[in-house]
Image (spheres, coloured by chain):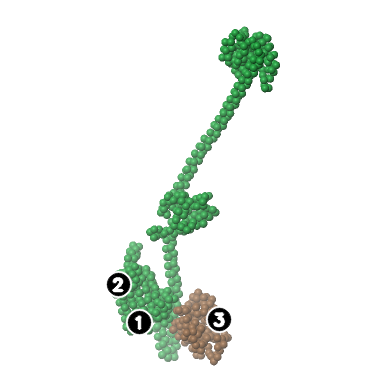
Chain colours: A brown, B green
Amino acid sequence: MSGVRDKRVDTKRILLVEDDSDHAELAKHCLHDYDERLVVHHVIDGVEALDYLRNRNNYADPEKSPRPHLILLDLRMHRVDGFEVLKEVKGTDDLMRIPVVILTTSESEIDANKAYDLHANSFLVKPGGYHELKKMLIEVSNYWLAINKRLW
Amino acid sequence: MTDKQHSVILTIDDEKNIRQSFRLYLEDYNYQVLEAEHGAVGIEMIERHSPDLVLVDLRMPDVDGLDVLKHISESTPRTPVIVVSGTGVIADAVEALRRGAWDYLLKPIEDMNILLHTVETTLERARFLDEKRKYREHLEAEVQERTAELLAANTRLMQEIEQRARAEVSVRESEEKLRNILESSPFGMHVYQLDDKDRLLFIGANPAADWILHVDHSKYAGRAIEEVYPVLFKDDVPPQLYRIIAMGETTRYEQQVNEIAGTSRIYDIHAYKAAEGIMVCNVIDISERAKAGSEREKLISILEAKNAELERFTYTVSHDLKTPLITIRGFLELLDDSLIQNDMEEARKCINRINHAASSMEELLRNLLSISRIDHNKTSLTAFNVRTLIEDVLELFERQIEERGIRVSIGDELSTVTADRNRIFEVYQNLLENAIYFSDGVPGPEIEIGLRGDTKRQIFYVKDNGIGIEPAYHKKVFHLFEKLDKDSDGTGIGLALVKRIIEAHAGTVWVESEGDGKGTTICFTLQSVKEAEACQASEINA
């Protein structure tokens, strides 16, 4: 998949895994404010996230569901939760290099440790206000999408 | 015969030629012969020389033969005396024999051989008598010695018997002490002995063993262990019991024994070697302790489950309360921005989102309150008609049922139950809310509310033909805050609340569904009326 580097070469893609539609809306808002060219794919739980990443079911077409440059992952979700997605991504050869940033309401140390043990690249706690969230998401996107060398 | 040579013979006679003829003749036969010419000298010589034989003439002047004989029989009665008398006085000889003479010779002695023969015979007889006397004396000494020994032995024996008797008394006393200890012990004790065929024979048991095990052990004495307990050892006597006796091992285990009444008791059995070839089993009835232990375990597991739920609760509450808060604050700032930009459409959207988040927070708080009340308030039981209650609940959903065209049926078998009415109302409210929600979009939605099972176990159920629940999630749905449907407006508390209410009524609740699109039936049981009343009564008493 790392060979897929074509006309979308300059398109930066984020996979947003978030089960709360309001929170997803806020995050998308922030990211669009930052860079309108940024493509945010929103999926609503772990099942859909893994379907997207593996191009299965509703996301079977790799053209429509291309490999993201960054995953923003909520932890508490129904059906398959964030930890399971993280474990799956970091345990699969052709997915493990995708940076995964945990974005959660949980301030629990247990959750943070567990996430890092499963090789999360970052652990962010959702702040209270929109501007703070925006600042956080801009910084994290900038770090992973601009400062770091992109591999695909 | 050697002592014949040394035998000393005294001849007392007043006739010198007779003395000489005796001497000359007897000296030829190696006798030593002393002579005395009359009785007095004779007596003197007897005393001085202690002759082995005395030949004495009867008729002598002054001291005659009878006087000598008298002296001899008084002083040395063992000295043989032969009287020599004249032919005319044979009566004297007879008298002499009567007085102790051993033999007699008649004068004149025509054949000296007669003299020799008489002397030899008399000496022989004297020697024989002497030996016999010595033998008898020896025998007496022996007898005396043996008697003394016997007496000593007897004394020792008597002492021993006395000691033994004392020892026996003290053994009996200590045995009695031991028996008292054994018999008053509250621990059951069994004693077994290994016989020469390597079987464990039951010897006896103390009274505690009888009443602990409800067995009259006395009738089993001498029987093999497998005959005493045919049920326990029906296959084989476990080898560790033999190892106890062989190697002095101890073993301790718990044994459950089923009683005829269907109950069972648990015994703590401790078997050990008490002496060579002897095994003792201590038996304690620990049924009560085990029961208390298992009740404690049960309580602990209930507490653990409650604690785990509490942890999940605080974790989730913090998350679920934070989620709408983040939404509200986020959209408030966005609202602020849009007002600055005079973007009224954006502002309206923000306000809607804020509103929505605020009401979901309210709903969450309301449910939290309701679930916490279940533990805090004791259930108050009343008898009421469930059918009427369900009709009341359905009124709440009248509009939705009508709009969605849901066909609702209530089973006729639903009648009176004894329970906490308000709680059961909440149960049906939650179950019907779910059933209506998950029937949405299904062609020909139907909800069936009924009762099945028998009088022993009545199962209340609410059945829909909606989207169904995958079997993997059947347990999870009752967890607090567990929402399987991400689009659901629910708080994830509804079924957890139902579960708590049902469990507070000592019932159980479960899901029956074959999965996607197959519809869902939620079933529950309630404590029977009798049980409920008993429970209520005990609470009142408490």
Q: In percent of the image, x 44 and y 68: which residue is there?
A: B304
Judged from the image, the secondary structure of the residue bearing numbered disc 3 is loop
Is A52 located above or below residue B99 in the figure? below
Q: Which mark is residue A55?
A: none
Q: Position of residue B390 (x, y in %)?
A: 31, 76
Q: Which image quarter: residue B48? A: top right
**Quadrant housing the C terminus of chain B:** bottom left
Disc 3/disc 2 C-alpha distance (Å): 62 Å
Name of the residue lying farthest toward the bottom: A7
Q: Which mark is residue B445?
A: 1
Q: Which image quarter: residue B308? A: bottom left
Nearer to us of marks 1 and 3 is 1
Q: Residues within 10 Å of mark 3 (few under 14, many from 20)?
A: few
Q: Residues within 10 Å of mark 2 (few under 14, many from 20)?
A: few
In the rendered structure, the answer to whether residue A16 lies left or right of residue B533 reads right
Amino acid beneath label 1: Pro
> Quick one: B201 or B331, which is closer to the camera?
B201
Chain where mark 3 sits: A
**Residue indicated by mark 3:** A93
Chain where mark 2 sits: B
**Quadrant housing the N terminus of chain B:** top right
**Residue indicated by mark 2:** B415
Disc 2/disc 1 C-alpha distance (Å): 25 Å
Q: In percent of the image, x 47 and y 53: which residue is there?
A: B225
